[in-house]
Amino acid sequence: MTAPAMHPAERQLVRALGVRALAATTFNVIVGGGIFGLPSEVARGLGAAAPVAYVVCAVAMGLIVLCFAEAGSRVSLSGGPYAYVEVALGGFVGFLSGVLLWLVISFATAAVASVFVAALAAFFPALGDGYGRGLLLTILFTVLGVINVRGVRQSTRLIEIVTVAKLFPLVALVLVGMFYIDPVQLEWQRTPAMAEIGRTSIVLFFAFAGIESALVPSGEVKDPARTVPRALFIALIGVTVLYIAIQLVAQGILGPALATESAPLTAAASRIALPFGVLLGVGAAISTFGHQSGMMLATPRVLFAFGRDGVLPAAFARVHPRFRTPHVAIITQAGVCAVLAITSSFGRLAVLATVSTLVLYLVCCIAAWILRRRDVRAEGATPFRVPGGALVPILAVAVIVWLLSSATGREFLVVGAVLVAASVVYVLSGAHRSRGERAA
């Protein structure tokens, strides 16, 4: 079975992304602001045994990556996961996947905003809680909203500037901090139970997510059957090594105190030398602000697309007459993220983002199995085939279900309520009929 023909506009895209470019893009997307706050969350759950959770997440992501790699080699259309799911499971499930992705990015944006506040609170304690925190978050999303309304050029320039500063403080902490580790602090006091590992892993998985965003430009990847799997695994290995190194350095320097720190990496760096702690704190603030900038550039376009397609009111598809940006969608997204960040903690938002991500990944793994069963192939391409046939998708689904079993009923209720509301909107808006007409 041949995958759906490309839209004429899709054929105009240049397939220029090779293994190195896609691996770098994936690495950059995954390593966001979460790692600046998560070491304390993981230490709170597992103590010195925290690296176990990183290994669990890496194995889970490895299985998921294999499914994404095969799906990406069979459906090489822009949209990544959207395209995989829609081809395999139809327009309605594809739409719900889009809603899940919007949830993922919204929760993640709000969660990382909390890390941004914690980074600044290390220098200005009054901003750490209460009215100061609320005011800072309001200013943050107001500034991001204004920048994005004024034009894409300003937004992308800002992202390019802050991206340069993302990895420097993390790599510097590892290279310098390894000489300050106290081996006693890395000794396990007890062996954690599986339930503890599962609950901690579902929080940590937040730092491993992002592959779904990196694969959106699938229509611009050259030789997808070769490029996608190699690039994804290079990025995954690099991310895992960096994350475990960061956790070991933070744990080795701070010991049990790591579990109580709101800005753990800044605290660890301060134990090395105060100027180094200041440098890392500034780097954390810049990195998390860069993450916010990138998410605020991308996410409103989902609301814009829903307005364009008639799923949401047409107002969401309005374009500013001067700046030519989807200003209603941008302002709405900034407001949603500000409210989420002000009313919830980093840990709670990270788990909600992870639950949404895992549900999205679950659907994508099922889609990968269906695409293989139907032998869907991109035009003129030999697809990448995951070794073991259906075993890998089954294992991926099993691991995802195990991780989701650690989520609470309230977390499922939040995600489920949004999907139910989206389903109602989808039917009442007539989007199912318009999709059918376009397909015909």
Image (cartoon, rainbow, N blue to C red):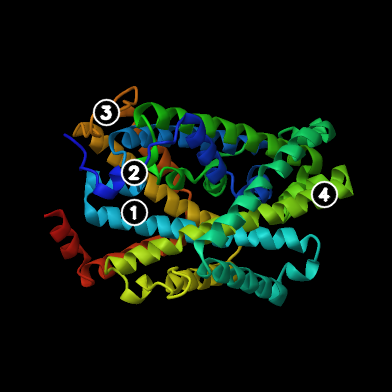
Q: Is residue 100 left or right of residue 246?
A: left
Q: Position of residue 312 (x, y in %)?
A: 32, 71
Label ID, residue 277? 4
Label ID, residue 381? 3
CA gap, disc 4 and disc 1: 41 Å
- Earlier residue among tags 4 and 2: 4
Residue in view at x 46 percent, y 60 percent: 299
Q: Amino acid at mark 3?
A: Ala
Q: Which residue is most to the left?
A: 440
Q: Name the residue that disc number 1 marks.
A: 97
Q: Name the residue that disc number 2 marks.
A: 364
- Earlier residue among tags 3 and 2: 2
**Considering the image in quadrants, where does the C terminus appear?**
bottom left
The vertical placement of 123 against 389, above or below, is below
Q: Position of residue 435 (x, y in %)?
A: 19, 59
**Considering the image in quadrants, where does the N terminus appear?**
top left
CA gap, disc 4 and disc 2: 41 Å
Q: Are marks 3 and 2 in contact (CB under 8 Å)?
A: no
Q: Are marks 1 and 2 in contact (CB under 8 Å)?
A: yes
